[in-house]
Amino acid sequence: MTDRIPGFATLAVHAGAQPDPTTGARTTPIYQTTSFVFNDADHAASLFGLQSFGNIYTRIGNPTNAVLEERVAALEGGTAALAVASGHAAQVVTLQQLLKPGDEVIAARKLYGGSINQFTHAFKSFGWNVAWADPDDVETFEQAVTPRTRAIFIESIANPRGSITDIEAVAAVARKAGVPLIVDNTMASPYLIRPIEHGADIVVQSLTKFLAGHGNSLGGIIVDAGTFDWSRDNKYPMLSEPRPEYHGIKLQETFGNFAFAIACRVLGLRDLGPALSPFNAFMILTGIETLPLRMQKHCENSQAIAEWLASHPKVAAVNYAGLPGDKYNKLARKYTPKGAGAVFTFSLKGGYDAGVNLVSKLKLFSHLANVGDTRSLVIHPASTTHSQLDDDAKTRAGAGPDIVRLSIGIEDKEDLMADLDQAMT
Ligand SMILES: *Cc1c(COP(=O)(O)O)cnc(C)c1O
């Protein structure tokens, strides 16, 4: 019994947590403190020099956050993780360890709208170049590789229509190019897809969505698969070269298969500063305990509603990978056998006007810019999340003018169908 490897649902409740050693509290307490007392001067010096692990200051680490980090690392099958303030913070901290000005990241064209903005504008201002590739055509990743490429970035289930990326095919391109594959696993959550098993070297998540799950807390996380050799070709000096701020230690040499997570913490988070509040870590930990139950219900509802919409006389098309005959159904059967996720798009025969009308008439669905809430959500991407793109780019990103995006919650599906039905009349 003791040798048993715990299953996913057990890890979701227990990984990383123990009764509090001083009080016996069974739920992980919120360590709402900025700083931690050192035992003595030697202890302080060894913490600052990375000779021993321990708490210093909540911008660099906190015991509540540490439980969250251990739990998500276990759920994703990684060696270590770093929790940060948001999904976007996870993305910038990750890439900051990998790119210098003039370096390049190849990114899938189908990304969360906020990520397209972040990559296009903020990253450009850092001097990082972005080459866009088509996640439905793996050759476009291969064609984009240059001597300055330092990473490839994709979403496992991609915004906004819930398309499924062939992670293994892109991982093969990354391996050949000698760069890490970063997978944003927000839309799948580790319950549906564990990208590390398909060749990802780094997984990032917006915890804000399905992991926290209740639409109440922002957070992000970076998971280190421990698979990448950072010292080859001298492409990643942050990890392979002596660090002046830590008495010249080399992170990969010292920390081995969790060096990337350490770099993100002691260089990225320490200097950029997007620390996660321990209160949010507590909320997200509580959310994760029911992740398997919620994801089952999210997927079951989504499948039923997608099927119902597909046969509705007012609906022109439904884009859900769980539907037989959908463009992504074959990939869904391979990568998401437990369900094709809870975010998908559809269009109405009445086009743009009917879409806008539907959004305004829905009552149970909330019209807002989020996904992965217990509540069902709706948005018209062309006029909101993807409004900065020109018409061609909108259509290429799967956010054409007639498209409505749903994030299906865990309510009774009959009530959701009734709401959609009344809004379409
Ligand atoms: C929401 C989201 C993000 C950004 O996360 P925040 O927590 O809002 O910063 C990144 N990627 C995907 C796929 C998302 O859905």
Image (cartoon, rainbow, N blue to C red):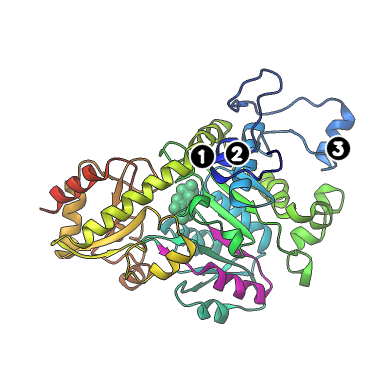
Q: Which mark is residue 288?
A: 1
Looking at the image, is 413 positioned above or below residue 23?
below
| Residue 169 belongs to magenta span | yes
Nearer-N-terminus badge (2/1): 2
Q: Which residues are magenta?
A: 163-184
The answer to whether 141 appears left or right of 23 in the picture is left
Q: Position of residue 337 (x, y in %)?
A: 45, 59
Between the C-alphas of marks 3 and 2, the distance is: 25 Å
At 86% across and 31% down in the image, what residue appears?
43
Give whichever of 350, 197 is nearer the camera. Answer: 197
| Count of number-bearing discs | 3
Amino acid type of the residue that numbered disc 2 sits on in the rendered structure: Leu
Nearer-N-terminus badge (3/2): 3
Give whichever of 239, 75 is nearer the camera. Answer: 75
- Disc 2 crowd, CA 10 A, few/some/many (<14, 14-19, 20+): many
Q: Position of residue 96 (x, y in %)?
A: 64, 57
Assign the N terminus to one quadrant of the image.
top right
Residue that protrudes farthest toward the front in the picture: 1
| Residue 24 belongs to magenta span | no
| Residue at numbered disc 2 | 68
Nearer-N-terminus badge (3/1): 3
At 55% across and 73% down in the image, what residue appears?
169
| Residue at numbered disc 3 | 46
At 73% across and 52% down in the image, what residue appears?
258
Give whichever of 189, 347 is nearer the camera. Answer: 189
Label 2 C-beta lies within 8 Å of the nearest ligand 1 atom: no
